[in-house]
Amino acid sequence: MIPGADFSAPVSTSECPHAAAGFGWPGHHHKKKMQNNNNIEVGRYLISPMSQARDGGGFDALVSIRSGRGMASVDRVMRFTPQFRSPQAALRYAKAEGLAWAHCH
């Protein structure tokens, strides 16, 4: 299980600790501005780390992991529970978690 991760939909487990944690859409959809500075291709996945300002201050880390094309595409979005002091720190964390997940799959 990924420490500090908040996932909403379980998936099948494998040898990868990230797969055992599950993934899915965050619980609510908020219309807050998200910062996404760079997409990274890893094999068949497109990793998009993002940061989002919290209402009470600080920043959340999120990552989108896309695969497939057209009607066969899948987009997994993970939101992590640690709070970060800067959007850059949240982006670094999201990037590291997204890359770790993609390398396990």
Image: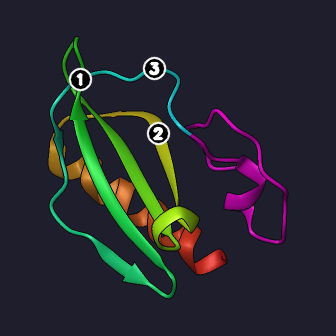
Question: What residue type is disc 1 on?
Answer: Lys
Q: Going from the N terminus, do you reach mark 1 or mark 2 first?
A: 1
| x and y percentages locating residue 51 in the rendered image | 25, 43
Q: CA distance from mark 3 to mark 1?
A: 10 Å
Q: Secondary structure at mark 3?
A: loop
- Circle 2 crowding by C-alpha within 10 Å: few under 14, some 14–19, many from 20: many
Query: Where, quadrant-wise, is the C terminus in this rendering?
Result: bottom right
| x and y percentages locating residue 36 in the rendered image | 19, 54
Q: Which residue is mark 3?
A: 28
- Tell me where the magenta segment starts and ends, as one range: 1-24
Q: Is 28 rendered above or below residue 44?
A: above
Q: Which residue is mark 1?
A: 31
- Circle 3 crowding by C-alpha within 10 Å: few under 14, some 14–19, many from 20: few
Task: Name the residue located 61 percent from the left edge and 37 percent from the top edge.
Answer: 7
Q: Going from the N terminus, do you reach mark 2 or mark 3 first?
A: 3
Task: Name the residue located 47 percent from the left edge and 62 percent from the top edge.
Answer: 65
Residue 13 belongs to magenta span: yes
Q: Is 48 rendered above or below residue 11?
A: below
Question: What residue type is disc 2 on?
Answer: Phe
Q: CA distance from mark 2 to mark 3?
A: 14 Å
Q: Which residue is mark 2?
A: 80
Give left or right: position of 99 versus 41.
Answer: right
- Front-most of residues 51 and 11: 11
Between circles 2 and 3, the one closer to the viewer is: 3
- Circle 1 crowding by C-alpha within 10 Å: few under 14, some 14–19, many from 20: few
Question: Farthest residue in the bottom direction?
Answer: 43
Question: Farthest residue in the top direction?
Answer: 56
Give left or right: position of 30 versus 86.
Answer: right
